[in-house]
Amino acid sequence: MNILIVEDESRIAKRIERMTRDIFGDSLQSLKYANTFHEALRFIENNSLDLVLLDLNLNGDSGFDLLTTAVSKSFHTIIISAYKDQAITAFEYGVLDFVPKPFNRDRLEQALHRAITKEKIETNTVKILAVKKRHKVQLIPIEDLLYIKGAGAYTELFLSNGKKELHDKSLEKLEQLLSFSFERIHKSYLVKVSEIKEIIVESGSKYIAELKNGERIPIGRTKYKDIKAKWF
């Protein structure tokens, strides 16, 4: 696990670091610390990470400016902030958890546990997915997303307007964030359940989900019964 702590108060950063090292133990490969917006942005752009622990107030700079870049990346983001009123907005951007300050070890461990165990977020919180484009971050509303296809370490987002966008997060990480409305119907596909028009059984025990727009997505044999039960 490679982790970056983004926190402008060194006392709090050291406390987070101490607790994180204690919680992860030997599974922690590297733990770095950045105390400014620009330092954190440079590190995120130039290093491979599994998790970012982000404060929302960085010496006067808004952590949300960094958040839009962070959530477009392959890693998960956990907010640690005193700005509790911004928790809903942070979840809408696709953070894994929001730990309000002041916090204790148990609350931080609960948040980190989500990253370790790949615990799914069951509530309808994520409203957008941020996609990194060449020189900007594009925000895609979840309501415009029909299904997601795994593409190696990346994923392809298929939208209602017929366009396709590439996301840096894996299918597993997006499943963790979007499990409230998307179902893993196949090892390579996440589909919005409300977009399924019909479930088709073809010869040779092949199962197909036909979407409202006419597209046909394969259903894994081990997934068929669960999908049929939820769809009906």
Image: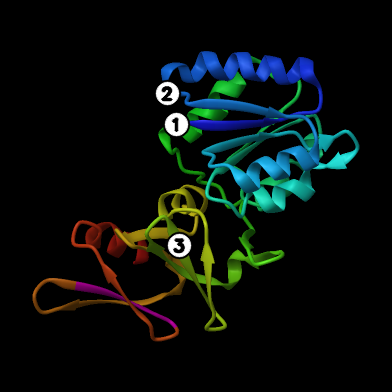
Q: Tell me, for residue 27, which label it has, or none.
A: 2
Q: Residue at x 75, y 33 (%)?
A: 55
Q: Nearer the viewer, residue 194 or 82?
A: 82
Name the colouring of the figure: rainbow
Helix, strand or loop for disc 2: helix
Q: Which residue is mark 1?
A: 116
**Occupied quadrant, residue 203:** bottom left
The residues bearing labels 2 and 3 have C-alpha atoms spaced at a distance of 26 Å
User: Which quadrant: the C terminus?
Assistant: bottom left
> Of discs 3 and 1, which sits in the foreground?
3
- The residue sitting at the left extreme is 204
Residues at marks 2 and 1 touching, judged by CB atoms closer than 8 Å: yes
* First of labels 3, 1 by sequence position: 1
Helix, strand or loop for disc 3: strand
Q: Tell me, for residue 155, which label it has, or none.
A: 3
| Magenta portion: prevailing SS class | strand
Q: Which residues are magenta?
A: 207-212
In this orientation, does residue 190 appear?
no
* First of labels 2, 3 by sequence position: 2
Q: Height in image: 186 above or below 41?
A: below
Residues at marks 3 and 1 touching, judged by CB atoms closer than 8 Å: no
Q: Is residue 209 magenta?
A: yes
